[in-house]
Structure formats: structure tokens, C-alpha cells
Amino acid sequence: MRAGLILAGLLVLLSCGVATAQTPTKTTPYPGPARIIGTDGAGCIAGAVRLPDAAPGMQTIRQSRSTFWGHPDVIAALQDLAKRAQAAGLPDLYMNDISLPRGGPLQGIHASHQRGVDADVWLDVAGPHPVLPVAERDTIEPHTLVRPDGRGVDAAYWRKEHITLIRLAATEPGIDRVLVNPAIKQQLCQEVSGDRSWLRRVRPWYGHATHMHLHFKCPAGQSECVDQAPPPPGDGCDDTLAWWFQQLDKPAPKPTSPPPKPKPVILPAACQAIMAAP
Ligand SMILES: [Zn+2]
């Protein structure tokens, strides 16, 4: 259990959890060369570029509620992943949140996604996915891959193509981790044969039953960008995975009254200057 708790602590900043900030949001990137500052839980980016609305093998979705800015290397890697998925016979990838034009917390949605190195890609491989007008892409709803009890994938929706997609993401150059629901990780542990080395980079986390969260390492030359510790050795199909299912057996914690307020995110001074610049 201790290993699981430590793991949970290490990964907490990577999750799509709640974060808050008082920083006003700019609608344009900070100009100049790409520069990533800070950590997953408190960081920003200058020189971000935007993922195209549509490119070979991919489409952005939910544009009215999402943001698609990232480090140029990460944006290129996402388009490379889309091309590899297309070559593998998968339908267009549905790309969702990356980061705000200058990064920082995405209010109310994600604790990470602050530095243009995180991207949500939906686990929707039921094609075809014809390129739709942007407005119609706003109404696409993914189906969860996980059973209501959280203990396994839903056989009615789970496909071999999901393995292909997650494997392609976990083997994309520059990737650090791919977060998926523990039930999805468990299914991979059971089904993947042959080369299992990529399973090390597929980590279990809360939610993530309809999408996977891609977390990239700090791109080369980004000395102000703080990397996570690498995933522990091995395929992760061990006690650290079992820990997640043990939690399902525990009674839900009693609600506190009033609920604790999330702590505001304090950005590094360099980020505050980037956020405040015109
Ligand atoms: Zn995410």
C-alpha cells in the first residue's frame, strides 16, 4: 500500500484535477522562442503554437470548451502520433485539451496542462471519423470504456484498436507517461503480448475512462522546465496496480463541511510576468 500511496503522491500533479488561479487569461501566446517554466502543478509557456483544427489523422474537438496550445515539439509529436494512428488503420484521433496560450492553470478542469506538454486524446476508435464542421465537433460525446463498478473494461466497447492507440502514444518519441483508468491499465496487462516494455509508461489514474492523458518530457534545451521522476521500472502490472482496486473496497470518506477549498496555484515569478504581459 505504501508504494501505491507514494506513487499517488508523485503523480498527483499530473492528473486532470481541480486547480485555481487568479491570473487573468490571455488569448494570445507570449511571443518569442518557446520557453517552458516551472512544474506540472505550477508552470507556464512562452512561444506556444496551436494544434491545427484538422490535420492528417486528427481533429480537434469541443473547441468552445477547450484549448489547444503547446510547445512546438509537443504539437509536432501529436501530429506525428495522428499520422502513425492513421497508418495503423485507426480513424481520426479526437484531440482535446492541451494548454492555454500562455499555460498556467486551466480553471476548474486540470491540475496539470499548464506548460504545453500535456494533451488529452480521446479513446474513441469506433470509426470512421469524417472531418466535421467545428460546431458539430462540439457535440461529440465519448463512451466510457470502464464498467460502472470500476473493476474492468466494458466488453461492449473495448476493442483491440484501443491497445494499438495506447501503444502508439506510449511509444511516441518524447513521451513521459500516458495516464489511463486503472481498469484500462489492467486490461492492457492482461492482453498485451510480445514487447511489453511500453507498458511501463502507461500509468493508472482516476477518471481517464474516455480519454488518455499524454504527458511529454521537458523538450530539449528547456532548462527552466522541471521533469517528473521517470516511471518506476517494470510494466506496472504489479502491487501498484492492485492498490487502485483495493481502494474500491474501502468505504467512501465522510464529506467534510464545508468542503476544503482548493489551494491557489502560485506561479513562478517568470510566469507571472509572462501572464501579465500584453
Ligand atoms: Zn489531461
Image (cartoon, rainbow, N blue to C red):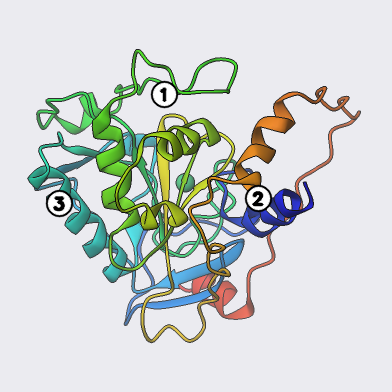
Ligand 1 closer than 8 Å to label 2 CB: no
Q: Quadrant of the C terminus?
A: bottom left
Residue wearing tag 3: 84
Kind of residue sitting beneath label 3 = Arg
Q: Residue at x 31, y 64 (%)?
A: 74
The residue furthest right is 257
Comparing labels 2 and 3, the label whose residue is closer to the camera = 3
Residue 46 appears in the rendering: yes
Q: Is residue 1 placed above or below 139 in the rendered structure? A: below
Kind of residue sitting beneath label 1 = Leu
Q: Are marks 2 and 1 in contact (CB under 8 Å)?
A: no
> From mark 3 to mark 1, how far is it between C-alphas?
23 Å
Determine whether, in the image, residue 254 is placed left or right of residue 106. right
Residue wearing tag 2: 20
> From mark 2 to mark 1, how far is it between C-alphas?
29 Å
Disc 1 element: loop
Disc 3 element: helix
Q: Residue at x 38, y 58 (%)?
A: 197
Residue 278 appears in the rendering: no
- Coordinates of residue 102 in the picture (x, y in percent): 44, 65
Marks 2 and 3, the one that precedes in the sequence? 2
The quadrant where residue 49 appears: bottom left
The quadrant where residue 35 appears: bottom left
Residue wearing tag 1: 145
- Coordinates of residue 223 in the picture (x, y in percent): 48, 86
- Coordinates of residue 154 in the picture (x, y in percent): 42, 17
Q: Residue at x 37, y 48 (%)?
A: 67
